[in-house]
Image (cartoon, rainbow, N blue to C red):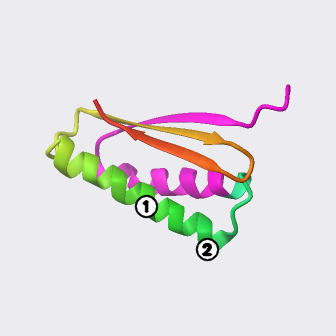
């Protein structure tokens, strides 16, 4: 590896059943990036809330859509993008 930090793209259906997966992946990525457990939990909650907003407001509950989460570990900084279409 050439010193680059891990990146991950997660695509999930726009259904609330996948929010636990979103929280779990976010929490783990935060831990890998060096966040302590409390910070990782706070970040997971924030990403959960952003994803819920996509499901409820952007997609108006339509289950056939996709939410994409882009994680990039910048060494002490974790960038998370929540993308809707």
Measured as percent of width and height from the top left, residue 66 is found at: 32, 33
Q: What crowding class fits label 2: few (fewer than 14 Cα within 10 Å), some (14-19), or many (20 or more)?
A: few
Asked if residue 74 lies left or right of residue 50, the reply is right
Measured as percent of width and height from the top left, residue 1 is found at: 85, 27
Q: What crowding class fits label 1: few (fewer than 14 Cα within 10 Å), some (14-19), or many (20 or more)?
A: some
Asked if residue 4 lies left or right of residue 47, the reply is right
Where's the C terminus, which quadrant? top left
> Residue 24: within the magenta?
yes
**Nearer-the-camera pick, 74 or 45:** 74
**Nearer-the-camera pick, 24 or 47:** 47
Name of the residue lying farthest toward the top: 2
Q: Earlier in the sequence, mark 2 or mark 1?
A: 2
- Tell me which segment is drawn in magenta: 1-30
> Residue 18: within the magenta?
yes
Measured as percent of width and height from the top left, residue 19 is found at: 39, 54
Residue at point 14%, 45% (across, down): 60
Residue at point 52%, 61% (across, down): 43
Asked if residue 43 lies left or right of residue 50, the reply is right
**Mark 1, residue position:** 46
**Label 2 – label 1 distance at C-alpha:** 13 Å
**Mark 2, residue position:** 38
Q: Is disc 2 placed on a helix, strand or loop? A: helix
Q: Quadrant of residue 14?
A: top left
Dot label at residue 11? none
Residue at point 27%, 46% (across, down): 54
**Nearer-the-camera pick, 77 or 20:** 77
**Are dots 2 and 1 in contact, CB under 8 Å?**
no
Name of the residue lying farthest toward the bottom: 38
Residue at point 69%, 58% (across, down): 31
Q: Is disc 1 placed on a helix, strand or loop? A: helix
Q: How many marks?
A: 2
């Amino acid at each position: 590896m050439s010193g680059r930090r891990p990146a991950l793209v997660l695509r999930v259906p726009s259904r609330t059943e996948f929010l636990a997966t979103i929280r779990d992946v976010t929490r783990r990525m935060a831990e890998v990036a060096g966040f302590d457990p409390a910070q990782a939990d706070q970040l997971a909650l924030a990403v959960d809330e952003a994803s819920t907003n996509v499901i409820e407001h952007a997609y108006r509950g339509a289950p056939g859509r996709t939410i994409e989460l882009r994680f990039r570990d910048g060494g002490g900084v974790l960038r998370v993008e929540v993308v809707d279409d």
